[in-house]
Image (tube, grey):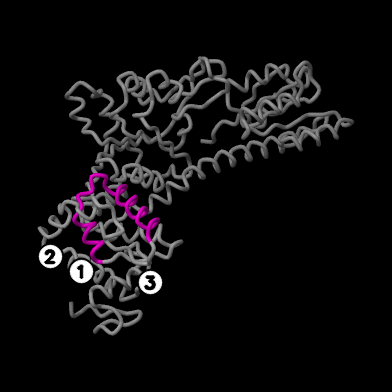
């Protein structure tokens, strides 16, 4: 179903105003009429329009004033000016100040519909570009959702299964395990991928601002509400709403959120207009929500709305076999500019010994810091912070407790991937999520580099292993 396309028509001549409104309505647009510039500015504080058509010559607030107001409060909204033939120069000057287009009077209705369609399409593209821009850096970060451990492979399988459904998802895991990255991965692989992914930090919203942040507000709704603002839930319409740390939401916030999830309707603060919303909910928490329910600190009915499917992310200390892959990935990300390309064996052992209370996020920051301070191409243990060099040996001990050593497990996995690609190293590197250069370093580490038996430049014979 096509989204509604709202156009504001501004003209102090009632006949012209109603004629334009009727023509645009017949063309499939939703239209509001304003009898003057002052009313148009007021309406701009109550709703987000996809386009504004305004006469230039009006008093006391002219079309130029309307243009200036919308440029300040709603710069994404195209403003089209209507002008008499003899005032075209004025309209051209207005375009230099940000008008989208102009139409001369008497208005040709075919031209009106064509310009309206272009203006609305332009507005939608600008807004979509804004969403894509804000999402781009997070999608780059989402590439760090890598891992070869069994627990992470199970997570990836679950993400693949749930992405195409409409089910709400609850992601649980310690801070830094990548809950938002998993949420974005679900969104990016869903039917809603082209629409907005809106992240709501539930722990950062005070009770006094919950309604304004979630539902939006109209101009003048309260002190400081100088412009119209869509709420986060409305921003997510058609896309995905990610409720980060939902366990920190206050009881008031929980009640208001539950009502929206039940009714799929919101009211902006200061407005009686009901706005229907359609978004997928993905929630995340580092807390055990069931325990919070039992303690009377989280609504049970809200929990049922959120956890149709639950994904639990393991802490990094429980999947130490992923540490080398993650470390190499972050080194490739941050080391390029300074030509830092390799982790020494003592550095890798130090990373494996550490218990990683901050999980993957902490590992990324450690590698980024080490690269920033490095003066040579190889990162050694001396380049790592003192707490890492003297860290607990939880990760390494867990790796040794499993069948085979970490090195043996990693070697076995690399060989298995190479076998699946019939020895094609370029393809194997892509499947492993590492560079070809990193793959060569791993092969050298395992004694499978150039000159080793059963290994050629592009093919690998694994029958002897």
- List the residue tagged with mark 3: 426
Magenta extent = 345-374
Question: At x 20% / y 21%, what residue is drawn?
Answer: 296
- List the residue tagged with mark 2: 404
Instruction: Name which of mark 1 and mark 2 comes first in the sequence.
Output: 2
Query: Looking at the rendering, which quadrant does residue 260 occupy?
Result: top left
Q: Position of residue 158 (x, y in %)?
A: 27, 48
Regarding mark 1 in the picture, which secondary structure is present there?
Answer: helix
> Are the residues at dot 1 and dot 2 in contact (C-beta closer than 8 Å)?
yes
Crowding around mark 2 (Cα neighbors within 10 Å: few <14, some 14 to 19, many 20+) is few
Instruction: Name which of mark 3 and mark 2 comes first in the sequence.
Output: 2
* In front: label 1 or label 2: 2
Looking at the image, which is closer to me, 81 or 448? 448
Q: Position of residue 86 (x, y in %)?
A: 89, 31
Question: At x 28% / y 85%, what residue is drawn?
Answer: 451
- List the residue tagged with mark 1: 412
> Are the residues at dot 1 and dot 3 in contact (C-beta closer than 8 Å)?
no
In the rendered structure, find residue 461 and report the number of the disc placed on it.
Answer: none
Helix, strand or loop: magenta stretch = helix
> Position of 397 compared to 215: left or right?
left
């Amino acid at each position: 179903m096509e989204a509604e396309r709202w156009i504001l028509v501004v003209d102090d001549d009632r006949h012209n105003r109603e004629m334009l409104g009727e023509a645009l309505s017949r063309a499939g647009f939703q239209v509001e009429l304003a009898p003057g510039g002052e009313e148009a500015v007021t309406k701009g504080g109550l709703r987000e329009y996809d386009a504004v058509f305004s006469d230039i010559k009006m008093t006391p607030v002219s079309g130029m004033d309307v243009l200036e107001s919308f440029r300040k409060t709603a710069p994404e909204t195209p403003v089209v000016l209507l002008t008499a033939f003899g005032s075209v120069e004025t309209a051209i000057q207005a375009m230099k100040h940000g008008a989208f287009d102009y139409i001369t009077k008497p208005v040709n209705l075919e031209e009106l519909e064509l310009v309206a369609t272009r203006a609305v399409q332009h507005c939608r593209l600008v807004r979509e570009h804004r969403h894509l821009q804000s999402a781009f850096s997070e999608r780059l970060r989402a590439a760090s959702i890598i891992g070869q451990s069994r627990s992470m492979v199970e997570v990836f399988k679950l993400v693949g299964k749930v992405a195409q459904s409409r089910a709400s998802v609850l992601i649980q895991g310690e801070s830094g395990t990548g809950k938002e990255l998993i949420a974005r991965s679900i969104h990016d692989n869903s039917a809603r991928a082209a629409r907005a992914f809106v992240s709501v930090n539930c722990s950062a919203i005070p009770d006094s601002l919950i309604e304004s942040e979630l539902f939006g507000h109209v101009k003048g709704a309260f002190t400081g509400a100088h412009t119209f603002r869509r709420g986060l839930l409305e921003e997510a319409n058609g896309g995905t709403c990610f409720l980060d740390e939902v366990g920190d939401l206050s009881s008031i916030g929980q009640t208001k959120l539950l009502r929206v999830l039940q009714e799929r309707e919101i009211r902006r603060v200061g407005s009686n207009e009901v706005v229907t919303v359609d978004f997928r909910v993905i929630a995340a928490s580092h807390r055990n929500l069931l325990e919070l329910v039992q303690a009377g600190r989280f609504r049970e009915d809200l929990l049922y709305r959120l956890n149709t499917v639950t994904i639990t992310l393991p802490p990094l200390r429980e999947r130490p076999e992923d540490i080398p892959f993650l470390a190499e990935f972050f080194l490739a990300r941050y080391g390029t500019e300074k030509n830092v390309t390799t982790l020494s064996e003592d550095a890798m052992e130090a990373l494996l010994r550490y218990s990683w209370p901050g999980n993957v996020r902490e590992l990324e920051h450690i590698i980024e810091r080490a690269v920033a301070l490095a003066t040579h191409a190889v990162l050694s243990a001396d380049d790592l912070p003192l707490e890492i060099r003297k860290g607990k040996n939880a990760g390494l001990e867990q790796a040794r407790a499993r069948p085979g050593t970490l090195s043996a497990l990693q070697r076995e996995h690399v060989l298995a991937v190479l076998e699946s690609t019939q020895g094609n190293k370029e393809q194997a590197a892509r499947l492993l999520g590492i560079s070809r250069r990193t793959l060569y370093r791993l092969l050298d580490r395992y004694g499978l580099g150039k000159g080793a038996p059963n290994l050629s430049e592009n093919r690998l014979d694994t029958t002897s292993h």
